[in-house]
Each structure stands twice: as C-alpha cells, then as structure tokens.
C-alpha cells in the first residue's frame, strides 16, 4: 500500500506535454522553436536537424541566417519583424543551405503563440523538392506541347499553301495582321495566341475544294462560288475534334460571318460572332484585296482600307477595324510577302 502511494500520478497538463513532445519528435516536417522576439533557436526536431545536416547543439542559440541556412541573408532578418507584428507568416518557396552547402527548397509557416507567460515562434518547414521537380516536369511538358501544337498548325497551313499555291502565305499574313490588331485592342496574351493559331488555319477547309476551282483563271460561277464557300464548314469539320485550348474550330467556321448577318455559313449577327473571328475577318478581307487572285488583279491597299472604313460597324467590328486602319495609316504596317 505504501509503495503504491509513492507512484506519481501524471497530470492532464503533463499528458498534453508528452503527446506534443511525441508529435514533435516524430513529425515528418521540420519544426523549429524560436525565442520571441530574439529569434534564436531553442529547439528543433530530429527531422529538421536531418534536413539541414546540423546537430541540435549546433543550432541551439543561433538564428537561421547566422548559420547560413537561409540563402537570402538580407531578407530573412527583415521578415522577422513582420512575423512579430502579424503573428503569422508564410513562405511558399524558401531556399535553405544545408551544412554541406547544398541548397534545398522548403515551404515554411511560422506562428507565434504563448507557452505560459513566454512567447515563442514555431516554424514548420516542409521539403518541396518533389513538388519543384513535378512543377519543372509539368513546365517542360507544357513547353513541348506548345511546340508540338505550333508545328501541327504550321503543317496544316502548309497543306493549304500547297493546295492553293497562288495564295501561298495568305494565312501567315492574315495571322500576323490579326495578332497586330488584337495587340492594339489590348487583348490578353492567351486570346492573342488563339487568334494567331486560328488565323494560321482559317482556310484549312480549302483542302476539300477541287483544285480547278481554287486556281480557276476566270470568275467563278454561282455553283463554284457556293462550293468555295463550303471551305468554312469543311475546315470546322477537320478541326472540331482537336482539343485546342482556344475555340479554333469555331473561329474557322465564323471568319466569313458579318455583323449585319450577311455573311456565311450561318448568317450570324453582332456579338454572336466570336471576337477572334471578327478580328480575323478584317485581316482576311484586307489581305485578300491587297493581293492578286487567279481571276482578278488586286484592288490594292488603298481600296481595301477605304472598304474597311466604309463598312466598320456595319460588316466589321468597329473597334477592330479602327485598330487595323491605325496600323496601316499611322504605324505604317505592311504585309510581309516573304511568307509566300
């Protein structure tokens, strides 16, 4: 009976401390305990010492930037007052230098809390090497995908040039002008890239049109004209199953639509025509009027710009038409016929 009375009963507070200590010691993230406001290391768990390659004795009493762990030597001490003020700070990618000189990248969350009457800082550090590697691999994949997509679009564009050599380079010139118009309008980079891609293949459907119609040296009759108009639907059918990050198939389908509904194939009006197609429509018409065709000589650039000025807001998007007129009349834009 007497011996049993001498056994110390563990208080709830002691049980809580023991549980915390077990979690601290076995955590698979690095944990640092710093004094506040001095910022000196008072404790570190085994995962942290293994992460940095220092012993606990080498860390105790030091600041991280004093042992060279933080590569941003100036930024680290400047960030500490912000932590003291806010009580919380997060860094998604903090480069740390291990004792052996190698650099690792960690995510760090620092929080201030009270232990009795004492304020301490707890820093949780997680190695993000695997995440960084995954991000790098994803970026490499995206770059490769972008290159492949450009190569595919250029190949499709070349098919049209080979099918209709009289207008070789037309799609590339329309693409360049469309991009310049979109840039003038201040459109987002992603949208501009979609316009570039759509314009590069806007006539892809011509591969389905008989070559004798494409190269006919005299004016097309009504039946032949209707066959030629079908190139927009044919282009849509070719592209609709390709998962572009832009509505390329719709752009191709709509680039001959006009604001007043007089265009084809569906007689769309106003904003029912996508913005990309409204821009390409302008570049397509201007380039077509600037160059000869098998059945007619070119009306010329002056005639093209006069047509655009007269039909802006009627057939063509007003803002895009204004941007195009400014490019030619004020900024001296010119087509690059080396494309052909």
Image (cartoon, rainbow, N blue to C red):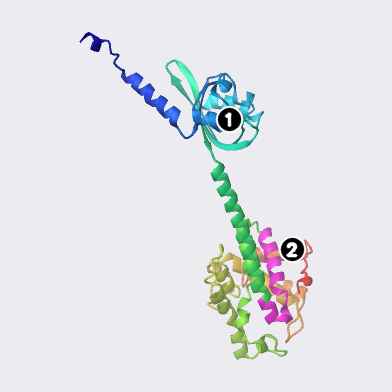
Neighbourhood count class around disc 2 (C-alpha, 10 Å): few under 14, some 14–19, many 20 upward: some
Span colored in magenta:
159-184
Neighbourhood count class around disc 1 (C-alpha, 10 Å): few under 14, some 14–19, many 20 upward: some
* Residue shown at 58% from the left, 52% from the top: 137
Place of residue 251 in the rendered image (x, y in percent of width and height, measured from the top left): 58, 69
Q: Of callouts 2 and 1, which one flags the residue occurring earlier in the amino acid sequence?
A: 1
The vertical placement of 210 against 316, above or below, is: below
Q: Nearer the viewer, residue 116 or 261?
A: 116
Quadrant of the rendered image containing residue 318: bottom right
2 and 1 marks in contact (CB < 8 Å): no
Place of residue 187 in the rendered image (x, y in percent of width and height, measured from the top left): 63, 57
Asked if residue 80 lies left or right of residue 166, the reply is: left
The vertical placement of 305 against 11, above or below, is: below
Place of residue 316 in the rendered image (x, y in percent of width and height, measured from the top left): 63, 70
Which numbered disc covers residue 53? 1
Q: Which residue is mark 2?
A: 327
Which numbered disc covers residue 199? none
Quadrant placement of the C terminus: bottom right
Q: Nearer the viewer, residue 256 or 50?
A: 50
Q: Nearer the viewer, residue 200 or 279?
A: 200
Q: Is residue 181 magenta?
A: yes
Quadrant of the rendered image containing residue 57: top right
Place of residue 225 in the rendered image (x, y in percent of width and height, measured from the top left): 62, 86
Tell me the element at label 2: helix
Asked if residue 114 lies left or right of residue 233, the reply is: left
Q: Residue furthest left?
A: 1
From the image, give the main secondary structure of the stretch colored magenta.
helix
């Amino acid at each position: 009976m007497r011996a049993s009375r001498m056994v110390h009963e563990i208080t709830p507070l002691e049980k809580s401390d023991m549980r915390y200590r077990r979690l601290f010691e076995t955590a698979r993230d690095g944990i640092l305990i710093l004094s506040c406001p001095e910022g000196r290391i008072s404790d570190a768990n085994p995962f942290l010492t293994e992460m940095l390659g220092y012993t606990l004795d080498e860390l105790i009493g030091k600041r991280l930037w004093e042992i060279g762990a933080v590569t941003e030597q100036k930024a680290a001490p400047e960030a500490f007052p912000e932590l003291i003020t806010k009580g919380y700070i997060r860094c998604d990618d903090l480069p740390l230098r291990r004792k052996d000189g190698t650099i690792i990248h960690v995510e760090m969350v620092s929080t201030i809390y009270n232990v009795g009457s004492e304020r301490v800082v707890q820093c949780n550090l997680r190695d993000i090497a695997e995440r960084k590697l995954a991000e790098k691999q994803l970026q490499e994949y995206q770059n490769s995908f972008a290159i492949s997509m450009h190569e595919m679009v250029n190949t499709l564009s070349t098919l049209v040039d080979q099918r209709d050599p009289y207008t070789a380079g037309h799609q590339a010139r329309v693409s360049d002008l469309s991009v310049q118009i979109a840039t003038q309008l201040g459109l987002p980079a992603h949208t501009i890239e979609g316009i570039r891609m759509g314009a590069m293949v806007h006539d892809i459907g011509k591969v389905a049109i008989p070559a004798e119609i494409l190269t006919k040296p005299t004016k097309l009759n009504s039946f032949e004209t209707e066959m030629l108009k079908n190139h927009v639907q044919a282009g849509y059918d070719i592209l609709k199953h390709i998962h572009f990050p832009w509505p390329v198939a719709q752009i191709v389908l709509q680039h001959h639509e006009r604001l007043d509904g007089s265009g084809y194939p569906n007689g769309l009006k106003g904003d029912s025509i996508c913005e990309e197609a409204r821009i390409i429509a302008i570049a397509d018409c201007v380039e077509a009027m600037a160059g000869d065709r098998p059945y007619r000589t070119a009306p010329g650039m002056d005639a093209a710009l006069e047509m655009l000025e007269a039909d802006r807001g009627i057939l063509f998007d007003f803002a895009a038409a204004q941007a195009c007129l400014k490019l030619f009349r004020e900024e001296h834009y010119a087509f690059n016929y080396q494309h052909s």
